[in-house]
Image: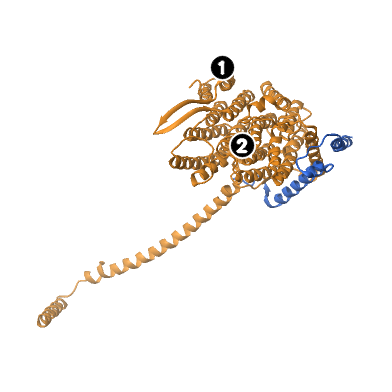
Amino acid sequence: MIWKLFIAVLALTVAAQLLVEPHPHFVVERLLAWNALYGFLACAVLIVVAKALGLLLKRRDDYYDD
Amino acid sequence: MISHPGLVLILGAALLAPLRGWPRAVVALGAPVFSLLLLLQLDEGVHWQARFLGMELAPLALDKLSRLFAIIFALMAAGGALFALNQERRMELPAALLYAGAAIGATLAGDLVTLFIFWELMAVGSTLVLWSAATPAAYRASMRYVMVHLFGGMLLFLGVAGHVLETGSTAFAAMQLNGISQGLILAAFLVNAAAWPLSAWLPDAYPEASWSGMVFLSAFTTKTAVYVLLRGFPGTELLVYAGLAMVFYGIVYALLENDMRRILAYSIVNQVGFMITGIGLGTEMALNGAAAHAFTHILYKALLLMSAGSVLYVTGRRKCTDLGGLYRSMPFTMACGIIGALAISSFPLTSGFVSKSMISQAAADQHLFAVWMLLAAASAGVFLHAGIKFPWFVFFQKDSGLRPAEPPWNMRLAMALLSALCIGLGIFYQPLYQLLPYPAHYQPYTSWHVVAQLQLLLFSGLAFFVMLGWLKRTLTVTLDTDWLYRVFFARLATLGASLAVRVIARVEAAAAAATGRLEATVRAFLGAQGVFARTWTAGSMAVGMMLMLLALLVSYYFF
């Protein structure tokens, strides 16, 4: 139920792009759902990078305890 | 003394120390409010001047930029004091007022010498705030914290001394990065701004403070650093890279973190990164954006930390793995936490939206496509690591079985007031824009901008829930640059010490052997049984004497 509502809101924000007067800073912003895709991908990349770095740098949380 | 907004707070701190009960509350709230009123009625210009050791000092100077920062510091001191009124550690509030007063003093310093003095006083005040948590972990963290800040203070002292010698002026104005002295001053500022790699002191120390202590700590040190960078190094390109590095470092480490207050600590570094990027961009729009973002950030970060502090206060727990499901019994704290989370994520109608957008706009105005793209990715990342992660893992996630009550009234009131400011500034942003150092003609609410921002943020939210499995909290810490001085250098020192012990042992053994041989030789000749101590018979004595006389005779014969 919450998921359906969430997806509806997501679709609405993409659709709204068609209704408003565009004034993009760069040409990529003219693409439909550009910000949506970019936001999603940026987060996915950040999570993957964090996960990879975690493999290298994570320690048990009593690591520093004496 | 009474007309200096910083010294008023420091005086208040001294007054506050012995007080209890309602007089304590009156002074704790009255001193910051009085300081705020002073700031509002002081005219711009240099109010105090003095000569000291042949140097021109201006301990009280005011312009639009310093007024903006001093106002938010005084406001935050008041809000923090309200939140901390029921703090049972009696040292914390006076320490916090000293700390806030020093931050205001540094902001109103017209010269580098006064700045240095208040800079060091800030280190003292903040260390005292950390100490008042009174746990062994806080004490150890405070020692590392104070080392880093004394190191930064040393850099600043060397830089200021060199700068004054070179230029003959103590005035604190925009500098060019063209010498060692200016480089040292910049480095000192960046230490306090928690720029990577000098960043780990912040997530190391701040979360060890008491439930109210971290609210104060989050506001002053890093934002004073933003202020001095705004004044001293606007448009320094290096700061764009330093800022972007901080932005992504903050996000990635916050994503890995399990302690709710360390998540928020890394998110301070992330937010200060946005401001420093703006300072590096250096246009009026960018500098306005950095200043405005510092102002709004102090409020919503304090709100987030009050929400986290309330949770810590009532549950005594900080780890996401121990928390969850608190929305059931703490709906008010949850609502305030979510307002703070929306503001830090720059949702439209919150304060973060009207401030952070100016920095992105400045990058776009300069046609810096890469910087603009990175800032947009970072904005998405902020929602991910602070905007959703913090409320989700603390208030929702799983049912931890905890059913704590809401915190006392003063804590709730402080959160309510800050929530109102976070939303109020997002809607009525003109008063904030009028305080900015340059004329602000920026219009944040275009329908295009609002739609773009909503797309960016909501799809980041989608990414969070789609990839939730990858974000599962574990009982871990993530090694940061403080590992270098907590473990690596410590191990290096242990290794060096054991090596030194072995070398010294070798040298000692060799020396002992050598002295042993020497002693044996000396004994052989001079000892009780030695050659020279032997008792000789009269006959051999006579022979010896004869031989010596003979030798004498022979020598006469030849020479």
For disc 2, the neighbor class at 10 Å (few under 14, some 14 to 19, many from 20) is: many
Residue situated in front as seen by the camera: B323 or A22: A22
Residues beneath discs 1 and 2 located on the same chain: yes
Residue A61 in which image quadrant: top right
Q: Where is residue B40 in the image (x, y as percent from the top left)?
A: 58, 21
* Residue B134 seen from this side: no
User: Which colour denotes chain A?
Assistant: blue
The number of numbered discs placed on residues in the rendered structure image is 2
Q: Earlier in the sequence, mark 1 or mark 2?
A: 1
Q: In this view, does B119 lie above or below B184?
A: above
Amino acid at the residue labelled 2: Tyr
Chain containing mark 1 = B
Answer above or below: position of B302 versus B156: above
* Secondary-structure class at tag 2: helix
Q: In which quarter of the image is the C terminus of chain B?
A: bottom left
Which of B248 and B265 lies nearest the eye of the viewer? B248
Relative image position of residue B390 (x, y in whole percent): 73, 36
Under mark 1, the amino acid is: Pro
- CA gap, disc 1 to disc 2? 29 Å
Report the side of B314 relative to B202 (left or right). Answer: right
Residue B506 lies left or right of residue B318; in this view the side is left
> Residue B398's image quarter?
top right
Picture residue at 49% right of the left edge, 47% below the top: B180
Tell me the residue that label 2 is attached to: B206
**Pointer 1 with pointer 2, Cβ within 8 A:** no
User: Which residue position is annotated with label 1?
Assistant: B23
Instruction: Give the letter of the chain under mark 2.
Output: B
Q: In this view, does B257 lie to the left or right of B78?
A: right
- Drawn colour of chain B? orange
Mark 1: which secondary structure? helix
Q: Could you classify mark 1 by the number of other residues whose Cα lies within 10 Å: few (under 14), some (14-19), or many (20 or more)?
A: few
Q: How far across and how far down the image is residue B271, in percent?
A: 67, 38
